[in-house]
Amino acid sequence: MADTGWPGCAKSLKGVILDLCGVLYDSGEGDGVAISASVEAVNRLKASDLQLRFCTNETQATREKFVAKLRRLGFDISVSEVFPPAPAAIAVLRERGLRPHLLVHDGLLPEFDGVDKSNPNCVIIGDAAENFSYQNLNEAFRVLIGLEKPVLFALGQGRYYKETDGLKLDVGVYMKALEYACDLKAEVIGKPSPTFFQSVLNDMGLKPDEALMIGDDLVNDVGGAQFCGMKGVQVRTGKYRPTDERHPTVTADGTVDNLAQAVDVILRQRGH
């Protein structure tokens, strides 16, 4: 009988999905800093018989600029392998005929260049960092409260993330503020949305039980993947906190010190 637990499940895997910030690198000044041995870990996965994709809630830059930064840090990554929320959000806007008011980071704005933003009938909120001012939040609130059927999209719902100088509040905090003010529920595009994870699995042509998610965010990376039927492993880098290992609702299938250790375990199980 096949071993479905961690690490035995690695024997039957066909694909691995990696989070980026907190797993491959810590963001911060300049391009940020690659986490120890993570560049080599990605190379080892790419040299194996496993498919590899990168699933991120990064919304501070266009996908092209973000991938260029990762390549400068030494990672062998191409644009087609990276799945961020913004392109998925644009597809939803077109499908539903929606025109967004944007509360996002300046670096993400070029992604929406071809999108009609006149007379907005929804709001999109991403990790806007310094753009999360009272004035900007209030403007988004006024758009929503003025709509007969307000629609709020959040590009992820993280509480915080880690940069080189410490922890930073993430988009989920501001999403909750707008939900409370407007008495509505945001639609999340990005992790932990099952639709978002499924789009990555579809790209690989795999079923959920054939893929493993590795992330630093217990709820959005690991819990989101598990909800879709994947295994989820947490790394003790990035936003990891020791209390994650005693979380009341989400239990990782495995916990490892870093990506390099996870890759060691996976490849050892597969006889590499």
Image: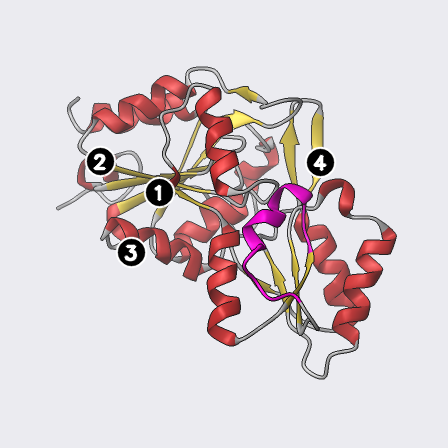
Q: Which residue position is annotated with label 3?
A: 202
Q: Residue at x 47, y 58 (%)?
A: 88
Q: Amino acid at mark 3?
A: Asn
Q: Quadrant of the C terminus?
A: top left
Residue 207, compared with residue 77, is above or below; it is: below
Observer-side mark, 1 or 4, equals: 1
Mark 3–mark 1 CB contact (< 8 Å): no
Distance from disc 1 to disc 2, alpha carbons, whole Å, reads: 16 Å
Q: Could you tell whether 90 is left or right of 102 in the image? A: left
Q: Amino acid at mark 1?
A: Ser
Mark 1–mark 4 CB contact (< 8 Å): no
Q: Tag on residue 50?
A: 2
**Residue 115 position in % (x across, y down):** 56, 62
Q: Amino acid at mark 4?
A: Lys
Q: Residue at x 58, y 40 (%)?
A: 61
Q: Which residue position is annotated with label 4?
A: 168
Mark 2–mark 3 CB contact (< 8 Å): no
Residue 184, compared with residue 132, is above or below; it is: below
Earlier residue among tags 2 and 3: 2
Observer-side mark, 2 or 3, equals: 3
**Residue 54 position in % (x across, y down):** 40, 39
Q: Secondary structure at mark 3?
A: helix
Q: Residues within 10 Å of mark 3 (few under 14, many from 20)?
A: few
Observer-side mark, 4 or 3, equals: 3
Q: Which residue position is annotated with label 1?
A: 80
Q: Residues within 10 Å of mark 1 (few under 14, many from 20)?
A: few
Q: In this view of the protein, which residue sits in the foreground, 175 or 235?
A: 175
Q: Amino acid at mark 2?
A: Leu
**Residue 127 position in % (x across, y down):** 66, 46
Earlier residue among tags 2 and 4: 2
Distance from disc 1 to disc 4, alpha carbons, whole Å, reads: 28 Å
What range of the chain is rendered magenta? 103-117
